[in-house]
Image: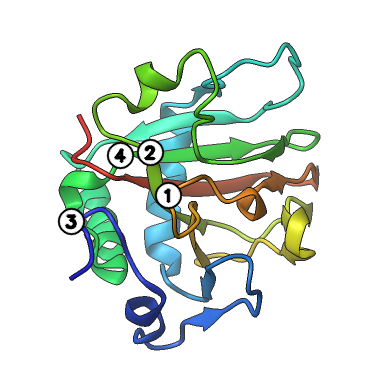
């Protein structure tokens, strides 16, 4: 039986229209049209209404490292709650292990340089971020719109670039079988060259998220 904070390749591949990226180094999955046009438009409206500058858990001194804007999307909103339920259902992960759904907005010229969603165990802030809920296990990200130019997600270690496409889901396992962060999950939210890019992200933890 899988732990409550975990999904699995077998579970995800049992979903209709799910595709697995063919790499032995990373469990990475793609499903087109996970969200429909109306769902995406409703989330974009909420992100635009409540966005703020994005921050970094472990600031590295590079003020251009992450230049997007962020919005917390709380499940007290029925629209958000329905989206969260869809993500939890497709991954099979206990909802208690999920972080608050987050929206991101990238204008032309904005990016999030190569990074991992895991918290670095050697960092000074590791205990603050992981002491209660543990490490991030899985990431689910959905593009909310087509982007005029740029804005792809590049998994450098496996040579895979995913183009933004409205409603497209990406899901990946952040860790190796022994629980250590998987370096092959490092990804670059590449610069938007023209237009605006919107995504949502839900991260899951080893233990219930508080």
Residue 7 position by quadrant: bottom left
Is residue 78 shown to the viewer in this render?
Answer: no
Residue 6: percent from the left, percent from the top? Answer: 30, 59
Q: Is residue 23 above or below residue 151?
A: below
Front: mark 2 or 3: 2
Q: Earlier in the sequence, mark 1 or mark 4?
A: 4
Front: mark 2 or 1: 1
In the depicted view, which residue is nearer to us: 171 or 149? 171
Is residue 19 shown to the viewer in this render?
Answer: yes
Is disc 4 placed on a helix, strand or loop?
loop
Task: Tell me the CA gap for discs 2 and 1.
Answer: 9 Å
Q: Earlier in the sequence, mark 4 or mark 2?
A: 4
Residue 75: percent from the left, percent from the top? Answer: 20, 42
- Residue tagged 1: 179
Marks 2 and 1 in Cβ contact (< 8 Å): yes
Task: Tell me the CA gap for discs 3 and 4.
Answer: 11 Å
- Label 3 Cα neighbours within 10 Å, binned few <14 / some 14-19 / many ≥20: some
Q: Earlier in the sequence, mark 3 or mark 4?
A: 3
Report the side of 153 relative to 30 (left or right).
right
Is disc 2 placed on a helix, strand or loop?
loop
Q: Earlier in the sequence, mark 2 or mark 1?
A: 2
- Residue tagged 3: 94
Q: Is residue 10 above or below residue 27?
A: below
Mark carried by residue 59: none
Front: mark 4 or 2: 2
Identified at 46% across, 82% down, the residue is 18
Task: Tell me the CA gap for discs 2 and 3.
Answer: 15 Å
- Label 2 Cα neighbours within 10 Å, binned few <14 / some 14-19 / many ≥20: many
Identified at 43% across, 31% down, the residue is 71
- Residue tagged 4: 99
Marks 2 and 3 in Cβ contact (< 8 Å): no
- Residue tagged 2: 135
């Amino acid at each position: 039986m899988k732990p409550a904070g975990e999904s699995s390749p077998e579970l995800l591949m049992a979903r209709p229209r799910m595709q697995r990226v063919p790499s032995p180094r990373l469990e990475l999955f793609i499903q087109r049209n996970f969200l429909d046009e109306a769902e995406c438009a409703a989330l974009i409206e909420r992100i635009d209404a409540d966005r703020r500058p994005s921050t970094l858990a472990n600031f590295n001194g590079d003020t251009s490292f992450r230049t997007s804007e962020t919005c917390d999307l709380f499940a007290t909103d029925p629209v958000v709650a329905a989206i969260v339920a869809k993500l939890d259902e497709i991954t099979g992960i206990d909802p208690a292990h999920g972080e608050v759904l987050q929206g991101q907005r990238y204008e032309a010229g904005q990016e999030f340089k190569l990074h991992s969603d895991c918290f670095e165990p050697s960092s000074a802030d590791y205990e603050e971020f992981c002491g209660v809920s543990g490490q991030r296990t899985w990431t689910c990200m959905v593009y909310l719109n087509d982007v005029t130019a740029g804005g792809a997600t590049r998994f450098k270690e496996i040579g895979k670039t995913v183009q933004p496409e409205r409603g497209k889901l990406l899901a990946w396992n952040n860790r190796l079988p022994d629980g250590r962060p998987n370096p092959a999950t490092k990804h670059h939210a590449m610069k938007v060259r023209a237009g605006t890019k919107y995504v949502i992200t839900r991260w899951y933890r080893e233990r219930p998220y508080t």
